[in-house]
Amino acid sequence: MPSCTLITNHANGAGLERDARLLRGIFEVKGWQVRDHQFNAQYMPNKSDWIIFIETYIPHWTQQANFKILLPNPEWFHPSMTSALRHIDQIWCKTYDSLKLFQRLAGVEKCIYIGFEANDLYLPHIPKQRKFLHVAGKSIAKGTEQVIQAWRSGLTAPLTIVSYDLFLPDSGRGHPSITSLDRVDDIILQILLNTHRFVIQPSWMEGYGHVLHEALSCAATVLTTDAAPMNEYSGIDKRFLLPVHNKIPRFETWFHHVDPNAMRQVVEFAMNLPEEELDAIGEQARAAFLTDREEFRRTMKEIIPDGIS
């Protein structure tokens, strides 16, 4: 039985943990033995056939496997690591934006576009309400401050913000249209994603964007940043892309800040659309989610050999 070691932050309670859990399941179904190794462990991982670095790349650990893979999130890849990419056999890219970057850094032959998938959280029996949901979690890079500025500029549509308390800007407290929730469990988040008609995520940058794709799975109307990779997702109606007014360098990529005034205009446009049109937008979003998921699964089936003959 071949073995694979997944190296990342397995307990971050966010995207990295989800990435590792998904990959573990894929490899196990293919008949592989899978080991988890914490990225900040003080000891090297055991030897295995394959090793996959999820976001965090530790070059001297590549000697512990015959085949080495990097699954990067570009906003966390430091330029000083570029020369060490020679130790990597393949780079699996979750977005076309990432593919373009790492083809430049490591060469076209090493890079594979795989896409990715998020949890399918759809509950079709729950009716949609004309409310907005913003999920910041414990990240400062989801554009939460810009969302709050847009609402403070005169928006009255109901807005729910899910954010660890320490990460919610003070400006978001006390607004009559804003409901603030601290961390919620997976069941509550699923209900929120299904009850809110609109999900607004003006992310500065995404390695993949689990919440964006979970929202698409729930047939939500998604508003997000008009910058890569957020604007490359096929399930997002281009009319709901939020204009960028400022770019800040971040390692080999950029953080994109959305203009709160332009955001307000898009929110008002969305709120004025008839219910039938919003239903159609939601259906298209879910269809795109399912198509992208099948393409990802087909790719994984092709590039991961069977572990049991």
Image: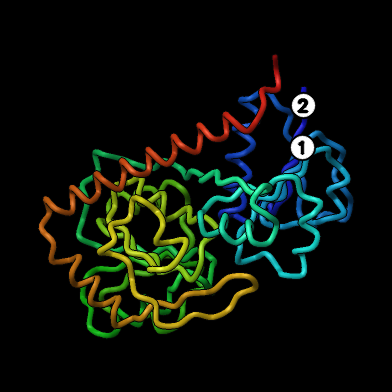
Which residue is drawn at the image coordinates 32% and 63% (left, top)?
A: 223
Residue type, mark 1 in image = Trp
Q: Are marks 2 and 1 in contact (CB under 8 Å)?
A: yes
Q: Position of residue 256 (x, y in %)?
A: 47, 75
Seen as rendered, the residue at the extreme top is 309
Q: Could you tell me which residue is drawn at 88 percent across and 49 percent down?
A: 44
Residue 95 location (% of width, % of height): 51, 53
User: Where 199 falls versus 287 (above or below)?
Assistant: below
**Which residue, given by chain and number where applicable, does mark 1 sit on?**
50
Question: Could you tell me residue 29's position as x and y percent?
Answer: 61, 25
Q: Write down the residue under mark 2.
A: 2
Q: Earlier in the sequence, mark 2 or mark 1?
A: 2
Rendered residue at 44%/39% (across/down): 293
Q: Nearer the viewer, residue 270 or 111?
A: 111
As measured in the structure, the alpha-carbon distance from the residue carrying label 2 to the one carrying label 1 is 8 Å
Report which quarter residue 126 is drawn in. top left
